[in-house]
């Protein structure tokens, strides 16, 4: 192979990336592997584990704090009401942020290549490489290229005495960031398996817990205050994860269609995301016109699709955000949501931009406004459905003639 001797590995300290270290040295011939762990809101224990594993492997590990950048992207996704097949995007949004940080370290450290531990069946390989293949560095994917299975990796780790922990973390594939926590693998791969409660960490069983009201203020579609107190994006998400998670809010168990066409069973936790998306959409309902809401649903769906693909920096997304940003200039105000029994629902909202007239809509007022009376609706009612009635009559007449 060419004289390439240093590679930067996306490093978590988990099974996949741990076995990648000796494989990159022995199978690919690299003299030095450096690890890069990117902080997008994982638990502290994961960084301790990554550092201990790196030390045991003799790998220099770089830790990059990207929480603020990731939190900003998550709030951009709120403006787009971004969900994929019904769940808030989390892992998908984190991957481009992580990939950029790894690439920056790789360039700073004069690496010849970048590597990840993704399989050839999932989405993350595409999300990482969409960023990396815009560089001159070689891209390596040992798990995919060598056709490794999780069982083979565990046996390989045992034979080499690699520092890999067992237990549930070894049984499941778990990905945690500020916005969401995903759990997949092992018995969960069977769609008929009912998951045990111990797979969840962020959300509790809501039985018997009293309801809680939370007030969220928005400026230009971005949440800026919680219960009247200004708050930064990272703290906002962390606090709502704790508050809403205590009520069991934000669990998803679904069959997800991946980019490569595979259908997989996924379990997610996303308390803060659920609350913020619910509140934002409730405020949009109040301030946007009917036409804006209908068209924005299409825009939001396209944004979410590109976000799921990890192509959040595509020119198409810039164009979509032109519409999103313009409509959200009026998404200012507050929404109160109720957390109760595993559910989050809006119970109050207010905004100076509300496209709403209480007197016009009230059943206690005789007329509408601006000279419009209830009797004016008679003409509209006569025309409503006229073409459909005409079409039905024509079809009936044609059948009778036959």
Image (cartoon, helix red, strand yellow):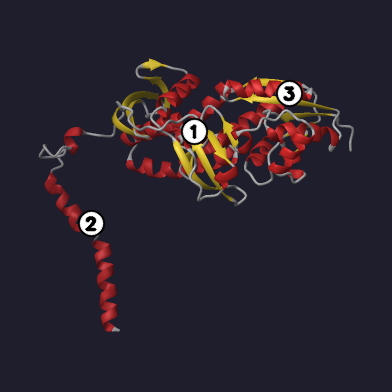
- The image shows residue 198 at horizontal and vertical percentages of 50, 34
For numbered disc 2, what is the local secondary structure?
loop
Is label 3 or label 1 in front? 3
Q: Earlier in the sequence, mark 3 or mark 1?
A: 3
Quickly name the residue at label 3.
54
- The image shows residue 160 at horizontal and vertical percentages of 79, 33
Residue projecting furthest to the bottom:
402
Q: Earlier in the sequence, mark 3 or mark 2?
A: 3
- The image shows residue 57 at horizontal and vertical percentages of 77, 25
- Quadrant position of residue 66: top right
- Residue at 40% x, 31% y is 275
Judge whether residue 215 can be spotted in this image: yes
10 Å crowding of disc 3: few (<14), some (14-19), many (20+): many
Relative height, residue 129 to residue 218 (above, below): below
Q: CA distance from mark 3 to mark 2?
A: 70 Å
For numbered disc 3, what is the local secondary structure?
helix
Judge whether residue 325 can be spotted in this image: no
- Residue at 42% x, 41% y is 296
For numbered disc 1, what is the local secondary structure?
helix
Quarter of the rendering occupied by the N terminus: top right
Quarter of the rendering occupied by the C terminus: bottom left
- Residue at 38% x, 15% y is 229
- The image shows residue 168 at horizontal and vertical percentages of 59, 34
Front residue of this view, candidates 228 and 144 = 144
Q: CA distance from mark 2 to mark 1?
A: 38 Å
Quickly name the residue at label 2.
384
Quickly name the residue at label 1.
77
Q: Is residue 274 left or right of residue 3?
A: left
């Amino acid at each position: 192979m060419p004289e390439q001797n240093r590679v930067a590995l996306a490093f978590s300290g988990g099974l996949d990336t741990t076995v990648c270290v000796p494989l990159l040295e022995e199978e690919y011939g690299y003299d030095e592997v450096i690890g890069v762990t990117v902080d997008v809101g994982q638990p502290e224990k994961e960084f301790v584990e990554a550092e201990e594993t790196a030390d045991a492997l003799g790998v220099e590990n770089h830790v990059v704090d990207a929480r603020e950048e990731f939190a900003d992207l998550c709030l951009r996704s709120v403006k787009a009401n971004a969900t994929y097949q019904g769940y808030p995007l989390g892992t998908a949004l984190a991957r481009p942020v992580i990939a950029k940080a790894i690439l920056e370290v790789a360039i700073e450290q004069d690496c010849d290549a970048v590597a990840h531990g993704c399989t050839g069946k999932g989405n993350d390989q595409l999300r990482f490489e969409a960023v990396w293949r815009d560089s001159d560095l070689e891209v390596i994917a040992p798990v995919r290229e060598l056709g490794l299975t999780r069982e083979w990796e565990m046996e390989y780790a045992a034979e080499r005495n690699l520092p890999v922990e067992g237990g549930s973390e070894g049984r499941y594939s778990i990905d945690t960031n500020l916005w969401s926590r995903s759990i997949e693998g092992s018995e969960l791969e069977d769609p008929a398996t009912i998951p045990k409660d111990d797979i969840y960490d962020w959300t509790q069983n809501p039985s018997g817990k009293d309801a809680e009201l939370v007030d969220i203020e928005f400026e230009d579609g971005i949440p800026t205050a919680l219960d009247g107190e200004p708050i930064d994006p990272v703290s906002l998400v962390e606090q709502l994860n704790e508050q809403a998670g205590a009520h069991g809010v934000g669990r998803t168990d679904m069959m997800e269609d991946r980019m490569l066409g595979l259908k997989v069973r996924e379990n997610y936790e996303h308390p803060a995301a659920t609350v913020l998306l619910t509140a934002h959409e409730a405020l949009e309902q109040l301030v946007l016109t009917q036409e804006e809401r209908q068209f924005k649903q299409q825009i939001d769906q396209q944004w979410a699709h590109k976000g799921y693909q990890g192509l959040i920096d595509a020119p198409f997304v810039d164009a979509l955000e032109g519409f999103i940003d313009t409509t959200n200039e009026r998404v200012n105000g507050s929404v109160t949501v109720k957390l109760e029994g595993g559910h989050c629902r809006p119970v109050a909202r207010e905004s100076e931009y509300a496209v709403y007239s209480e007197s016009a809509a009230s059943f206690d007022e005789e007329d509408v406004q601006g000279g419009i009376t209830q009797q004016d609706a008679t003409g509209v009612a006569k025309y409503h459905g006229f073409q459909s009635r005409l079409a039905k009559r024509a079809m009936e007449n044609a059948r009778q003639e036959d």
